[in-house]
Image (tube, rainbow, N blue to C red):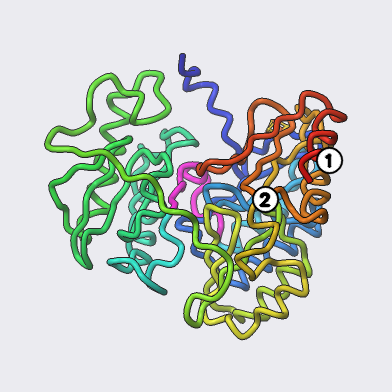
Amino acid sequence: MPESPRADRCPGVLRPHEAADGAMVRIRVPGGQTTGTALRNLSRLAQTYGSGLLQLTSRASVQVRGLPAVVPEPFEDAVGRAGFLPSAAHERIRNVVASPLTGLSGGRADLRPLVARLDQALLAEPRLAELPGRFLFVLDDGRDDVAGLGGDLGYRALDAGRGELLVGERRRTRPVRLVEAAETLVALALRFLERRTEEWHVRQLHEPLVGGTEAALRTPTAPTPPGMVGDHLVVDVPLGLLGPTQVDAVQAAVGGGPVVVTPWRSLVLPYAAPAASTLEAVGLVTQPDHAWTLVSACVGAPWCSNGRADTQNLAAQLVAAGGAGRRTHLSGCERRCGAPSEPHADLVAPTRVDLAELLLTRA
Ligand code: SF4
């Protein structure tokens, strides 16, 4: 049974989540599109007010943890000044995931302008502030890397100027023009709100949101591995945690230029291929065969009160021992936060000791 809409507890900057390690806020980054300067500004705020780390999420958002239980107003103001809080009412509904390499390499269309247009259109419609905080828009430039990530509404490019609408778990086969995509998605989101009773997602509605011919979504292609893509560099961020030194190295590599946060806890750094060794030296992963590319973990204990194991520490031990030889995700409880969408070994801690023993036998 879906939870009551009143129980929407998705965190935001102005609605922190109370975690075992302090308050945690989630900062939306539509399309993952940000800059080295903006990321460094956030890192400075995390150092001043929180744990000092930036945590990347599977929706290309950035979280700051370890904040005081009452999040200081100067922190919220500074997040706003850094450009991450354009609307208090809409902050939690700006959930837009886009193909991270769009406009840089491959794909059928450059969807970066659509990310900006959709974000502006969402902000401009007051009623959309009522969308659930977990409602997701996906914009796929035709390479099928994000179309199947469980979005509610989206666009999948067919060519440079046309694409298909993604509605729930289906794609509508009648093409729409790219220039009309943002407004069409906003209209569909409004229709969802009109039809919604207690549903969080489009796929939960009892009646289809739109008619017409539809087809199944394709399985997502594998995430782009770390390494060079032409002049660009993809770096994996172990455990999705970016420390101050790493953020400084990223900023040095791109200057004030663009950075793309991916939904796979990695970053795309345009034109930063020459900085690969510097970034590797601060613990970011630039090689596709690195053990960290196959190991992930939830936050776990002691950061999460549900955690029955220090999953991050165990993941680091697993990597230090050479990795698990296959995609592996460690969870501190049955919720399995952050588990990858692709097939993987699923290790859930029954007890702290059990998971450690399980790792030792597999390492
Ligand atoms: S899987 Fe469980 S222990 Fe891990 S972060 Fe989620 S709720 Fe916490």
- Residue at left offset 54%, top offset 68%: 268
On the image, the x and y values in percent for residue 176 come to: 16, 53
Task: Work out whether mark 1 precedes mark 2 in sequence or the reverse, and give the earlier one.
Answer: 2
As drawn, is 50 to the left or to the right of 327?
right
Q: Distance between the residues labelled 1 and 2?
A: 13 Å
Q: Name the residue under label 2.
A: 325
- Where are the magenta residues, as a range? 84-97
On the image, the x and y values in percent for residue 198 come to: 41, 19
- Residue at left offset 33%, top offset 30%: 193
Magenta stretch, main secondary structure class = loop
Foreground: 26 or 212? 212
As drawn, is 210 to the left or to the right of 8?
left
- Residue at left offset 18%, top offset 38%: 214
Provide the secondary structure element on which disc 1 rests: helix
Mark 1 lies within 8 Å of ligand 1 (Cβ measured): no
Classed neighbour count for the residue bearing mark 1: other residues with Cα under 10 Å, few (<14), some (14–19), many (≥20): few
Q: Is residue 95 magenta?
A: yes
* Image: 249 above or below 134: below
Q: Name the residue under label 1.
A: 360
Classed neighbour count for the residue bearing mark 2: other residues with Cα under 10 Å, few (<14), some (14–19), many (≥20): few
Provide the secondary structure element on which disc 2 rests: loop
Amino acid type, label 2: Gly
Amino acid type, label 1: Leu
